Image: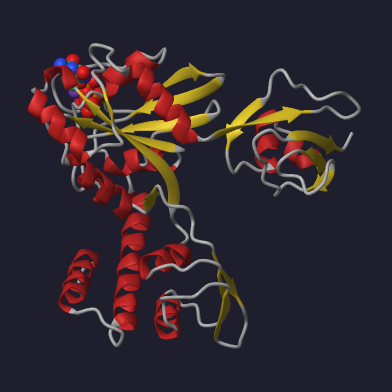
């Protein structure tokens, strides 16, 4: 019996060999789904048999950002400049061996920044501290990719490792809902024109042992995205790119790196160069919204809004307010951009928008 790694290689070979056309698309879809399942198995196995030494960091503040980069690109140096933390800096690789949290206050938001060990190629399958680092990244809201100006080509490697570990960077969860049923086979509904054909969709679901279900597509997605929906074990985070050590770069080198990553922020963490711009971009990328709380029977507090991430729902607000709020929650009233009419009565699933006024009613 072939090992999981051998099976993975075999399927990868077969995908490479198969030329893509209409007739082979469902075959390729099935192979990709098989591959995804094997990767999920590897993931599960190593989680079960792992060292058990997962890093435990409690999320805190309004958002969590993880510094992701190869060893010695300057992650710890940057953490020390942006936050109150002190993380050891060294001219050798793997100076940092655990998660070091720090806090940065910016424009009224409290942002948690996590320094972690360097990632290397193979991290997703467990090299270095890969597994533990990846678990931290999974739970963060933003990945700050930190590159050394001398090694700009690390970015695609980092992205590949995250992809392989089920982390989707700068993607949103596909707007596709699968509801399992008892009988009736797989029924497909769609509000948009689909590139995926029925046979491909069915063979992917089949690979995940889903034989009876209704599938509603509200978005035209590809094979890989459908596998993400079926596999469930995916995490969606946004990202930004920062290039460090510009103080050491020759002008030509800097120019090339800027052409390669026009959206990146170029800094010298060591010399505190361009850190204000970094904070600005970081803040923008996180997409904060302001929610004004109105205690029942009182006026809303328009002075000090709650700062939360876009997409936050009322249940998540309850969790932030008090440990009992979710249990005692009855309903809420909303005024403002997310309300259909002023004072709309809503439940915990209701998603808030910037500038909303919110009143939560709990059991006494
Ligand atoms: N010239 C220069 N050196 C820097 C800069 N940032 C960091 N360094 C140096 O680069 C080396 C590595 O810095 P660290 O902050 O330890 O890097 P790291 O990414 O945390 O490294 P690991 O924890 O080992 O993965 C140290 O010698 C730093 O002094 C910078 O902007 N310019
Ligand atoms: K280092
Ligand atoms: Mg470090």
Q: Is residue 69 left or right of residue 115?
A: left
Q: Is residue 58 visible?
A: no
Q: Residue at x 32, y 53 (%)?
A: 163
**Location of residue 261 in the rendering, given as x and y in whole percent from the top left corner:** 24, 38
**Which of these two is toward me, 349 or 341?**
341
**Which of these two is toward me, 32 or 238?**
238
Q: Residue at x 81, y 34 (%)?
A: 359
Q: Is residue 300 visible?
A: yes
Q: Is residue 76 above or below residue 159?
A: above
Q: Is residue 350 above or below residue 264?
A: below
Query: Total of numbered circles in the picture?
Result: 0
**Location of residue 37 in the rendering, given as x and y in whole percent from the top left corner:** 36, 67
Which of the image's four quarters has the C terminus? top right
Q: Is residue 212 above or below residue 278?
A: below
**Which of these two is toward me, 320 or 55?**
320
**Location of residue 270 in the rendering, given as x and y in whole percent from the top left corner:** 23, 14
Q: How is the image coloured?
A: secondary structure
Q: Quadrant of residue 257?
A: top left
């Amino acid at each position: 019996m072939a090992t999981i790694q051998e099976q993975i290689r075999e399927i990868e070979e077969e995908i490479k060999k198969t030329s893509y056309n209409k007739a082979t698309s469902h075959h390729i879809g099935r192979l990709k789904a098989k591959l995804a399942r094997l990767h999920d198995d590897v993931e599960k196995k190593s989680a079960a048999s792992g060292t058990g030494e997962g890093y435990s960091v409690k999320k805190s503040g309004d958002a969590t950002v993880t510094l992701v980069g190869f060893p010695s690109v300057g992650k710890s140096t940057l953490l020390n400049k942006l936050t109150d933390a002190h993380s050891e800096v060294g001219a050798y690789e793997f100076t940092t061996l655990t998660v070091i949290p720090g806090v940065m206050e910016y424009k009224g938001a409290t942002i948690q920044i996590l320094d972690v060990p360097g990632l290397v190629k193979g991290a997703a399958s467990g090299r270095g501290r890969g597994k533990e680092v990846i678990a931290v990244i999974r739970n963060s809201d933003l990945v700050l990719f930190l590159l050394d100006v001398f090694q700009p080509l690390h970015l695609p490697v980092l992205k590949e490792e995250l992809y392989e570990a089920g982390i989707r960077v700068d993607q949103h969860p596909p707007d596709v809902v699968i509801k399992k049923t008892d009988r009736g086979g797989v029924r497909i509904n769609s509000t948009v024109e689909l590139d995926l054909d029925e046979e491909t969709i069915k063979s992917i679901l089949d690979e995940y042992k889903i034989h009876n279900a209704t599938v509603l597509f509200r978005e035209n997605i590809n094979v890989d995205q459908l596998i993400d929906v079926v596999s469930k074990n995916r995490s969606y985070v946004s990202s930004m790119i920062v290039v460090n050590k510009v103080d050491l770069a020759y002008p030509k080198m800097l120019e090339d790196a800027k052409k390669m990553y026009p959206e990146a922020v170029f800094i010298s963490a060591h010399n505190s160069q361009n850190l204000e711009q970094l904070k600005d971009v970081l803040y923008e990328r996180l997409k904060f919204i302001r929610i004004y709380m109105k205690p029942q029977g009182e006026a809303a507090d328009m002075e000090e809004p709650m700062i939360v991430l876009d997409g936050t729902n009322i249940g998540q607000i309850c969790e932030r307010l008090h440990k009992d709020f979710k249990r005692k929650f009855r309903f809420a009233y909303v005024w403002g951009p997310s309300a259909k009419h002023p004072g709309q009565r809503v439940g915990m699933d209701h998603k808030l928008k910037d500038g909303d006024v919110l009143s939560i009613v709990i059991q006494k």
